[in-house]
Amino acid sequence: MQISMNGTSIGAKPGQTIFQAARDNGIFIPTLCYHDKVGAAGKCRVCVVEIEGMNGLQTSCSVEVREGMRIQTRTEKVINAQKLVVDLLLSTGTHDCIACDQNGKCELQNAAYYLGLERGSLNYGVPEKDMDESSEFVFVDRNKCISCGRCVAACNGTVVNEVLDFKYRGNKVDIAFDDDLPMGKSSCVQCGECSQICPVGAITDRNSRGKARHWEVEKVYSVCPYCGVGCKLELHVDRKANKIIRVNGVEGAPTNDGMLCVKGRYGYDFVGHEERLRNPLIKNPDGTFRDASWDEAIDLVSRKFFEIKSKHGADSIMGMCSAKATNEENYTFQKLFRQVIGTNNIDHCARL
Amino acid sequence: MISSQISTRIRELAKRYPQKESVLLPALMLAQKENKNVLSKQDIGNVADIIGVTHSKAYGVATFYTMYNVKDMTGTYHIQVDTNIPATLMGAKKILAHLERKLGIKAGQTTPDGLFTLSEVECLASCGTCPVIQVNDVYYENLTIEKTDALIDSLRKGVMPDRKTEYFWGTTCNVLLKNRGLENSTSIGVYRKNGGYKALEKARTMSPEQIALAVKDSGIKGRGGAGFPAGLKWSFLPKNHGKPVYLICNADEGEPGTYKDRQIMEYDPHLLIEGIAISASALGCKLAFIYIRGEFDWIADILDKAIDEAKAGGQLKDMDIIVHRGAGAYVCGEETALIESIEGKRGQPRIKPPFPAVQGLYGCPTIVNNVETLASVPFIIEKGADEFRKIDFKIFGISGNVNKPGCYEYPIGTSFKDLIAAAGGVKGKLKAAIVGGLSVAILKADELEDLVMDYESCARKGTALGSGGIIVINDEWSIPELALRSMEFYAHESCGKCTPCKEGSRITVKILEKILKGQGTSADLANVERLVGTIKGLTLCPVGEAFSTPIRAMVEKFRPEFEKLLTN
């Protein structure tokens, strides 16, 4: 269908919201609480627009497009409202971008930039709030929280871990883990969904803090090596140091839609670990190991298997597949055991 | 600790609701009452486990509503002094200051012996009988310094005095307050003897469409405050949806200056029950709810008893009514927040659309009507829509600086002057009045001269009839002070869901505080105007408008009073 936005005719799909249609057509409308995965919340009120024939301001995240709808995203009334909302947030939280890990990716920063607001003007005191450093992988700075509710919605509705909720009301509203425990003492499993979905720097990946800013890393798509689900990853790689700085799930990926488990998101230190095996090792008679080539190692293993088989029979050998391997690799592995070695002794550690 | 009796009671109560989570609010209150009026984290967790909700959800709910004491201790007697605008106008601050001196503690503190906790609370819907103190569950009204002393002395002896309330009231219409002065007016016998339940009998001979048509033809506008035609609201119910329909009576009377629904429920509960029964039959509803503010605990008991009588008397043949107590949240007067609250959630409004008529309680079509609206339905059915249009009765609650503050049932269209005369006239010199509950624009004395109390006339004056709660202000009061106290109320009651209300209300309080301290500048006053000017229409629910409209009007109409306080 065709709708008009700021006087220009653009295409939109039935069922889409005004915000989605604008985004598809490259028209920026600032938002803070909307996320594709958790839907419209109508909370931040920064995505407002004017629609011909409708009274007052409407939130573009919640109003669906209709054929011929005429929308204005940059009227004086809209900009004034958006400026007030962003001004209120800048004035009532501690939004220092300088060393913030979300710098360059922050949706509040984007909105402020779009509106030309460098700092808040309503300076009547900023309430001081907690920083929660109690958990191993997630850093929570409530001074930067804008109560958009994305983390709460994602924890309850997307990953269904049901750890997060809001406590208190009015301007005392804050996120709480279980019955207001430090994150590290709560039932949180550190999946990091809240960190990924947070639009600002309130919830960040603890071990990535200060390692590299978003524009300094190369984003590399990969598949999680841990289990057979095959979650799609976005590795943030510092090429100069040849290190993975951060791992995100890929939003919209059919396997995981951005979600990851604690291992997939935070268990990447093995990649660059100094104790990691880099080539095969063969045990010396005195118990120490020596470096070997792949050819030598495979020859040794194959020779030993056939010796065992000829001496004790094929059923004296068994194979354990790995959950870290793909379906195809596991299929090949059982073929090897059944066809080449000649045993059905195959099992699988469907755990990590 | 939650005893096995309470745990069983919670499980039993849960069975009454279509969804078990709905029992969370009453369950938390049961747990609190069993534990010296304190709700510990452990008990919140226990309640969550009994019901089968997460601890975070239960904790979020317990800290949302003000009646839950989520802290280490509360005094044996929780002295809660209402200091909202009507109460302030009628001397509540003096009572509070006296109590602070007498008990040797500040509001928010507990005496060292653990006997008293003193709190300053928001409107208790006793605006005609202020100053009012709620001690634990019990209201003590019309207080003076002497009566307050007697109350405290009695509590020190361990005796909760009987509550005696004398009201001023009057009616020229004899409908909603018809039974108000009768002995045993809450009993079904008295109600029937006085012609009650005849409308229900008549309704049973009518089709649902005929009943709905009568209500539509009457043109009755919702009496809660928004003034939306009730019949039109009913007509939004979808047809053939295959889901249950719920009717909710909104008895969360929380708009400062408003205490009219209470008169009906406390003195004529069967009138409301009859109205609900008739309306339910028109709407095809089998389960109705009365969502009553938690502070009205004793009124909820009256309703429960009346419902039992009505059931025993065969008045509720094929339906049930659940009295669901809130737990302290003004915003739950907003219909979607109210629905969330019945569902056992934090009382935060939903995005509209979908409107409740399409998707309301438990995702089903739901109609939410105010007490007074539903209590007017029996008259409409019995006497007909034409007769209703002729009288268009309404209860006006008059509070503040008048000689006989009280509830007066008069036709809509009565002049402001006549209503004030009914309330014994202004005490002192009239300065201004807020005529539709605190959330409407203030009118100056000269604007009130020729004011007629109907929807259109009020709109022409730039204000609203609202709930019909008239707050009269004499010339002893400073408008900036009242603006600050009003704003403190809205900031306290903001649910915190949307940014402009959550942050805007607090910032506006901060600026007004600065101005009242004599430290404000014209830039500060300009900030107030920017905030209230922009927030109107920007928030998720009407609460943003509820504070931006009155504060804007106060600044615009009494600007010299604000400017006098500025440093430049």
Image (tube, rainbow, N blue to C red):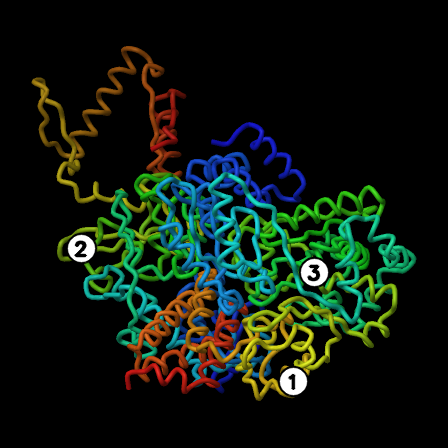
Residue at 14% from the left image edge and 30% from the top image edge: A281
Query: Percent position (x, y) of residue B100?
Result: 39, 55
Q: Do the residues under discs 3 and 1 have CB atoms within 8 angstroms?
A: no
Res B515 → quadrant: bottom left
Horizontal side of B201 relative to B266 (left or right) equals: right
Q: Label 3 amino acid?
A: Val
Earlier in the chain: of badge 3 and badge 1, it is 3
Q: CA distance from mark 3 to mark 1?
A: 26 Å
**Which residue is tagged 2?**
A211
Q: Is residue B182 above or below residue A120?
A: above
Q: Closest to the observer: A325 or B439?
A: B439
Res B427 → quadrant: bottom right
Q: Point out which mark residue B371 bears.
A: 3
Other-residue count near label 3 (Cα within 10 Å), few / some / many at <14 / 14–19 / ≥20: many
Q: Is residue B297 above or below residue A107?
A: above
Q: CA distance from mark 1 to mark 2?
A: 68 Å
| Helix, strand or loop status at disc 2 | loop
Q: Label 1 amino acid?
A: Leu
Q: Label 2 amino acid?
A: Lys
